[in-house]
Image: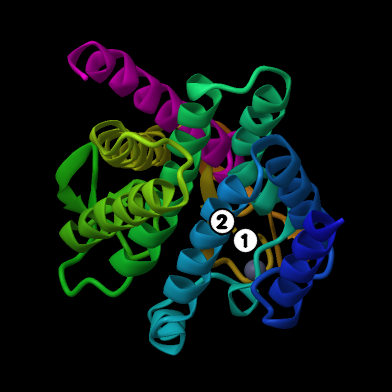
Amino acid sequence: MTEFFVVVAFALAAVLLRAIDGRGFLASAAVGFAIMYGGGFSWFVIVAVFFTLGVAFTLYKYGYKRRMGGAQEKGGARNWPHILANGGVASIAAMWNLTSPGTVPAVIFLGAISTSAADTVATELGLLSHSQPMLITHPSRPVSPGTSGGVTPLGFVGAAFASLVIGIMALAVGVLSDPNLVLPLCVVGGIFGAVFDSLVGATLQRKGYCVVCLKPTEALRHCGERTRATQGKWYIENNLVNVVSTVAGALAAYVTLLALAPLI
Ligand SMILES: [Zn+2]
């Protein structure tokens, strides 16, 4: 019963802080319950840390990022597709852990959350970079801040920092007990997942413009109308890229486990 109230209170606080929108409440509660029941309090703490990192870095210098044109829309409040895209793979790992608890589902969970944390912090910190973002696939080609596939050295530092924080917290609350395993697999998983996200963002992700205000946008809808795609695959938008990247980060963490386990 305590678990139920913790999840509801956390999701409610997120709505009141405008970190998520009203419909995002149900999505966060669903992800929260899956993680809490499948992984227990220690897993929930990790999701809470990711969430707090995301909110803090989204709101940090929000006004400046808004003027630069790269800030998250609606005051940074995340919607339900975004929440499911970032929490989906972690929730599946939690359900897996419920049926057969062990190291592997925990590693998949940590790799997925490290990716979401790394990608979010890299994006938000990268928007504050004084150097112009360059396309990850063509490092000599500058792109405007906030463009998917654009990378900055500051963003890379952000990705490493966020995955390290997830790793240190996972160690502190005992998601995995061995420090020789947990830190490398979170850092490798998080950075790999975030780089993968940028690679897909630079190549396959949908980019286009709004048919009403004519602003460039990567969203499916803008100003209440469907946007027109000019680059990438029309069906590959940001949330799908997030799902695929968390899978990639989770697999990278698992490979790191396989590589390190015989040595420890
Ligand atoms: Zn528009």
Mark 2 lies within 8 Å of ligand 1 (Cβ measured): no
What segment carries the magenta color?
235-264
Mark 1 lies within 8 Å of ligand 1 (Cβ measured): yes
Give the vertical position of 92 relative to 127 (above or below).
above
Q: In the displayed image of the protein, which residue is found farthest to the left?
A: 140
Q: Quadrant of the N terminus?
A: bottom right
Q: Where is residue 99 in the image (x, y as percent from the top left)?
A: 73, 19
Give the vertical position of 263 relative to 16 (above or below).
above
| Residue at screen point 72% across, 27% down | 98
Instruction: Say which label, 2 or 1, has the lower sequence index.
Output: 2
Residue on which disc 2 sits = 45
Q: Quadrant of ligand 1?
A: bottom right
Give the vertical position of 86 relative to 161 (above or below).
above
- 123 to the left or right of 90: left
Q: Where is residue 150 in the image (x, y as percent from the top left)?
A: 30, 52
Tell me the quarter of the picture where residue 261 sits. Answer: top left
**Neighbourhood count class around disc 2 (C-alpha, 10 Å): few under 14, some 14–19, many 20 upward:** some
Q: Name the disc covering residue 252, or none.
A: none
Residue 21 seen from this side: no
| Residue at screen point 48% across, 23% down | 103
Q: Position of residue 97 (x, y in %)?
A: 65, 26
For the residue pair 207 and 57, the one nearer the viewer reads as 57
Task: Judge depth for marks 2 and 1 and give the one in front.
Answer: 2
Q: What element carries label 2?
A: helix
Residue on which disc 1 sits = 210
Q: What element carries label 1?
A: loop
